[in-house]
């Protein structure tokens, strides 16, 4: 009998691991048992100490940097609960011949719905009306006058699976949609009824700007002071991607100086958002706690996809959601 294939789960956000354990039991072969180690930590030293003999690592928010990867000499794959892999040093993993997996299709409707909800609630002034009415007012004129959907432009920063789905929903309602994505051509966007634009054009012309790019070094603070200076003072910015894509200090300045009308944030630069953070007390800010991905169906899919990446490798196959495809060329 072979030595057990060891899976180390670094951290997760559910009350139990029944789904993961069930899939492991279904796939486990008699000649090669699977050992499951659960850490539930983000402490780097604890992670390093416990992954030294791991064949596979599964993480949610725990950082898997080069130091961790170097320590995990046996690890063949690092899988992540989620789409973004900014907490994994993918370049280092590739250099070390380790596969990186994510679940890149599990919450396309959920996140696009969440962004749409931010856009439409801002467009129709629902939070303003709610606050005023609950305080005893009954006067629609006290909120800013709404803009008809067919007169409004939504700018999508990024044009991957989620913003493509959002564009379909927006155009069905009647919004005009433009998108910035240097990796997608004009013709592909046009097929979706979307106008391709450069970032400066998009921020200057959009009434609502929705952020959907991954967090990498090139996109950190992609939206900063220069972009806020270009925006309409009636514009709203929406972020359901990653907090650091927006320069939070520059955004707060823009909000305070009324250079933009407001924002809807599911993600922030620091998470959880500190209790005393100014964003919690700003009337022109709508917040949710990194919940855009969440639904009953997505809750299952994220877990099935992430553990299945590892079980594919256990079976000697390429994981379904392989991020660093170029790692395959390094394997004999």
Image (tube, helix red, strand yellow):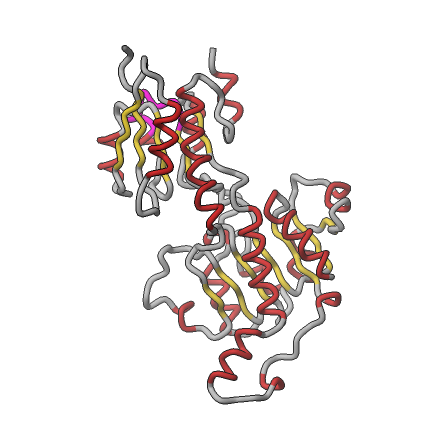
Q: How far across and how far down the image is residue 215, in percent? A: 49, 45
| Marker count (numbered) | 0
Q: How far across and how far down the image is residue 166, in percent? A: 63, 52
Please tell me which residue is depicted at 48% across the width and 51% down the height of the picture.
Answer: 295
Is residue 327 inside the magenta stretch?
no
Instruction: Name the foreground residue: 305 vs 43.
Output: 305
Q: How far across and how far down the image is residue 81, in percent? A: 42, 40
Q: Where is the N terminus found, in terms of image quarters?
A: top left
Please tell me which residue is depicted at 53% across the width and 74% down the height of the picture.
Answer: 127
- Looking at the image, residue 8 lies above or below residue 224: above
Is residue 72 inside the magenta stretch?
yes
In the image: residue 277, left or right of residue 221: left
Instruction: Name the foreground residue: 92 vs 279.
Output: 279
- Looking at the image, residue 42 lies above or below residue 275: above
Q: Which residues are magenta?
A: 69-77
Instruction: Name the foreground residue: 209 vs 101.
Output: 101
- Looking at the image, residue 303 lies above or below residue 327: below
Residue 57, quarter of picture: top left
- Looking at the image, residue 36 lies above or below residue 13: above
Q: How far across and how far down the image is residue 15, in percent? A: 31, 47
Residue 160, quarter of picture: top right
Please tell me which residue is depicted at 46% across the width and 64% down the height of the picture.
Answer: 287
């Amino acid at each position: 009998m072979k030595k057990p294939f060891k899976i180390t789960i670094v951290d997760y956000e559910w009350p139990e691991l029944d789904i993961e354990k069930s899939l492991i039991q279904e796939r486990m072969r008699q000649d090669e048992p699977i050992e499951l180690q659960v850490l539930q930590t983000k402490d780097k030293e604890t992670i390093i100490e416990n992954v030294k003999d791991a064949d596979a690592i599964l993480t949610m928010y725990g950082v898997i940097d080069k130091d961790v990867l170097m320590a995990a000499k046996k690890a063949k794959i690092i899988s992540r609960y989620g789409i973004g892999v900014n907490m994994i040093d993918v370049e280092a993993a590739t250099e070390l011949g380790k596969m990186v997996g994510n679940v890149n299709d599990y919450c396309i409707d959920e996140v696009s719905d969440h962004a749409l909800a931010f856009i439409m609630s801002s467009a129709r002034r629902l939070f303003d009306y709610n606050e005023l009415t609950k305080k005893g007012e009954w006067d629609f004129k006290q909120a800013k006058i709404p803009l008809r959907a067919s007169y409004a432009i939504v700018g999508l920063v990024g044009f991957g699976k989620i913003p493509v789905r959002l564009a379909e929903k927006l155009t069905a309602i009647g919004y005009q949609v433009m998108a910035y994505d240097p990796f997608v051509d004009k013709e592909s966007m046009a097929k979706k009824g979307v106008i391709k634009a450069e970032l400066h054009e998009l921020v200057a012309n959009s009434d609502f700007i929705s952020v959907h790019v991954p967090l990498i070094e090139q996109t950190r603070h992609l939206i900063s002071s220069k972009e806020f200076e270009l925006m309409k003072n009636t514009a709203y910015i929406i972020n359901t991607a990653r907090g650091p894509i927006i320069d939070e200090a520059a955004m707060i300045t823009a909000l305070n100086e009324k250079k933009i009308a407001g924002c809807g944030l599911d993600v922030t630069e620091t998470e959880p958002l500190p209790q005393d953070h100014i964003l919690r007390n700003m009337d022109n800010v709508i917040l949710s706690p990194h919940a855009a991905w969440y639904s009953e169906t997505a809750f299952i899919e994220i877990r099935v996809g992430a553990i299945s990446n590892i079980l594919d490798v256990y079976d000697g196959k390429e994981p379904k959601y392989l991020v660093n495809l170029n790692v395959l060329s390094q394997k004999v």
